[in-house]
Image (spheres, grey):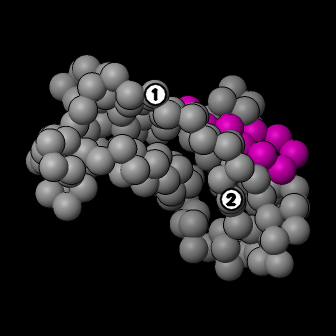
Amino acid sequence: MSNAKPSISIPLVHQTEIRVRYQETDAQGRVHHANYVKYFEIGRVEMLRASGISYRQLEQSGIMLVVTDLKCQFFTGARYDDLLTLTTKIKKSRGVRIQHTYELTHKGELVVAGETTVASVNPEGQVVRLPQWLRVNP
């Protein structure tokens, strides 16, 4: 996978559904807060997959994306077996960083909103530029 591969196009907005599993809930029966971070990662991975490249393939090309910043705002709690809709958006992508925003809803009601920044590194942990196809700006 080279930087010049024209057939790859990352979507600026991607939606995926997530069914809350029992083991993701706490003693109050709501999703434990740590699981929302995992849901955000599902959003990023599925957005990448929608471009035609899996995260595994990206890593095999020598690019790894590491979280450098994370924000999460809670509005209401999700429960076991809820079907959630996660909307992942690219806010900014250039150089070595991608900023994503997230909205997780249940039946149209906002459950959690968040934002992450990921940086591109090689297998040795050195910062490297994003491939051209990943450098997009809405």
Q: Residues within 10 Å of mark 2 (few under 14, many from 20)?
A: some
Q: Position of residue 82 (x, y in %)?
A: 15, 41
Q: Say above or below: 2 vs 44.
A: below
Residue 94 within the magenta-colored segment of the rendering? yes
Between 41 and 25, the residue placed more toward the observer is: 25
Q: Which residues are magenta?
A: 93-101
Residue beneath label 2, please? 66
Comes first in the chain, label 2 or label 1: 2
Near-viewer residue (43 or 30): 30
Q: Which callout, 2 or 1, points to the residue nearer the camera?
A: 1
> Is there any visible trace of residue 50 in the rendered image?
no
* Picture coordinates of residue 62, whole percent (x, y): 76, 75
Identify which residue is drawn at 36% across, 51% down. Answer: 35
Q: Residue at x 34, y 22 (%)?
A: 75
| Apparent side of residue 50 relative to residue 82 in the rendered image (left or right) | right
SS at mark 2?
A: strand
- State which quarter of the image contains the N terminus: bottom right
Nearer-the-camera pick, 68 or 96: 68
